[in-house]
Image (tube, grey):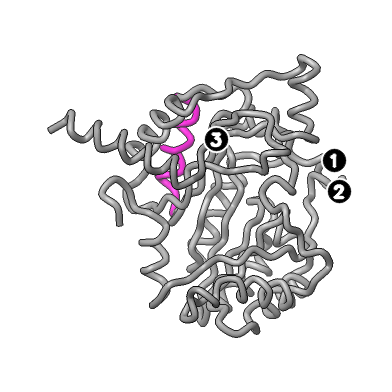
Amino acid sequence: MNPYYRDYADFLAGKFPGKVQKLPVDAGFSCPNRDGTLGYGGCVYCNNRSFSPLSGDGLTIRRQLEDAKRFFSRKYPAMKYLAYFQSHTNTYASADKAMALYREALGVDDVVGLVIATRPDCMPDELLAELASINRRTPVIIEYGAESSHDDTLRRINRCHLWQDTVDAVRRTAAAGISVGLHLIMGLPGETDDMMLTTVERVSVLPVDTVKLHQLQVISDTRLAADIAAGRESVDTMSVDRYINLCCNVIKRLRSDIAIERFVSQSPGDMLISPRWGLKSGEFVELLHRRLSQRSSRRM
């Protein structure tokens, strides 16, 4: 655990006896605000290739995991793995279909847990009960895309769910004994720093175990990029310095036992419009820790 906040490695160490690595898989799920169930086109900022550029290419879950394992096992032969269902909404299917995919992943040697990314309005009780059954034997972590606690923002970005959906999903999942993570985006259209910090405070009163946050990125081939280009939308693109200060304040407001998995996202350079900081995740964290150290020194 670093001296400034609980990190994700500390959270994982409390659940697994040795080193574990997330292995992203694409299970071919869709999304209810893409296929017309709730809406079309997805969230305004979303180009799924920006965060999972290597799709499953039609490969089975087992094949994707085995291929990914070979990459890590050469350097870390004792490594264990978490099957990370990342792309789109990974509970958006019948319980039987979803469970068959999860069981396929758990049938791969050295896969010791599941991480399932989904929307808070896509966790039916039937599936949650099935996942709770798995969790009694093998750890399951559910990551919900909350993005913001402000309903006006969620409507503006075409999220097609509200903050109360997140509150309900988190509480039901925690009550089922399953670890809960939330994903937040900093700098969404119309949001001030005070609004973002209010979201952090609202997260802190929920039974949440982990958070992932990152700066809003304007990505090519998205509705947000098109709306900005046409003058229909605007975003306040943060500098590195301002975002570091914001992250320091997030840490101060976040409940101390909640682990922070990440602060930034890195989309492929050929897709990213802004902000183009030119920093890798580790470089950003180093700058953040330096700022946190400076703040701590001034208080002494």
Distance CA(mark 1)–CA(mark 2): 6 Å
Q: Decide: marks 3, 2 in contact (CB < 8 A)?
A: no
Residue 35's tag is: 2
Q: Decide: marks 1, 2 in contact (CB < 8 A)?
A: yes
Q: Residue furthest left?
A: 300
**In the image, 111: left or right of 296?**
right
Could you say whether the residue bearing mark 1 is in a helix, strand or loop? loop
Q: Position of residue 193 (x, y in %)?
A: 47, 24
Residue 205 covered by magenta stretch = yes
Q: Residue furthest right?
A: 36
Give the quadrant of the C terminus: top left
Amino acid type, mark 1? Tyr
What range is drawn magenta here? 194-207
171 or 19, nearer to the observer: 19
Q: Give the quadrant of residue 241.
A: top left
Could you say whether the residue bearing mark 3 is in a helix, strand or loop? loop
